[in-house]
Amino acid sequence: MKAVVDTVKNIISPEQNWSQFLMKIIGVGVVAGIGFAGFQVYTGSQEEEEGPDDAIEVIFEEIPEKKLQVEEILNDLTRSNRDINSVWLYDWPDARNIVPVFNSPRNARDPLPSGYWMPGDERVIGSFVLGSCTRLDRKFPNAACPIMGKEDAWGVLVVEYIKAPEDDPLCILPNKSCVRPAKVASMKISEILYLLENKK
């Protein structure tokens, strides 16, 4: 601390003549100006971190056009295969709860009626967090895929079948007719909701 005080005293102490004192003050001013300008450039170059992605319901409320695009994809998915019994899109706002935000047809039975994950769904949740499609451990044939934000899963798409396709009776093979439609639809929805620029 004493060295700092001595340096400040030497900077502001008078010199033998005014020209040396003025040169010292100008030098200190130039160094301070360069330091300030460098600090401004440094802080201006820092990327502003965006907050976490919004929940699906929030995006639907703020940008209704995206809701219409997603509904069109899900309706097309429902009409594309006669073996599909229902299509459900769930918002996943926190670790345990899931909220249905869309289903087709409207009178379909909810495959996750409790509104939260059940014991035994741990493997499924792990697959969703890692961005993989899987099947829910339920009595009916189904395929389930995550709706991925930039860094995390924010929703789940569940496609329930009347009967499992012949090429994938367990609905677990990623490139067969059970999982592929759900995977393609979930990727399109993820792109619309989280990867395309959110214009409000």
Image (cartoon, helix red, strand yellow):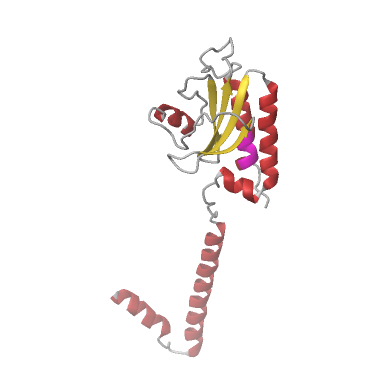
Q: Main secondary structure of the magenta part?
A: helix
Residue 34, given in percent of the width and then of the height, sits at: 53, 69
The quadrant of the rendering that contains the N terminus is bottom left
| Residue farthest top in this picture | 166
When the figure is inspected, residue 95 is found, relative to residue 169, above or below; the finding is below
Q: Which of 52 and 45 is in front in this view?
A: 52
Number of marks in the image?
0
In the image shown, does 45 or 87 lie closer to the viewer?
A: 87
Residue 174, above or below 65: above
Q: Where is residue 139 in the image (x, y as percent from the top left)?
A: 47, 19
- In this rendering, the answer to whether 69 lies above or below 159 is below
The residue at the point 51 percent across, 85 percent down is 22
Quarter-of-image position of residue 68: top right
Residue furthest out toward the front? 107
Residue at 44% across / 31% down in the picture? 125
Q: Position of residue 60 (x, y in %)?
A: 63, 45
From the viewer's perspective, is residue 139 above or below residue 89? above
Q: What stretch is highlighted in magenta?
A: 189-193
Closer to the camera in the image, 189 or 58: 58
Q: Which residue lies furthest to the left in this view?
A: 2
> Residue 122: x, y in percent?
40, 30
- Locate residue 120 relative to residue 26 in the image: left or right: left
Residue at x 43%, y 34% (from the top left corner): 117
Q: Is residue 156 magenta?
A: no
Q: Which of 7 and 125 is in front in this view?
A: 125
Q: Which residue is drawn at 38% across and 79% down?
A: 8
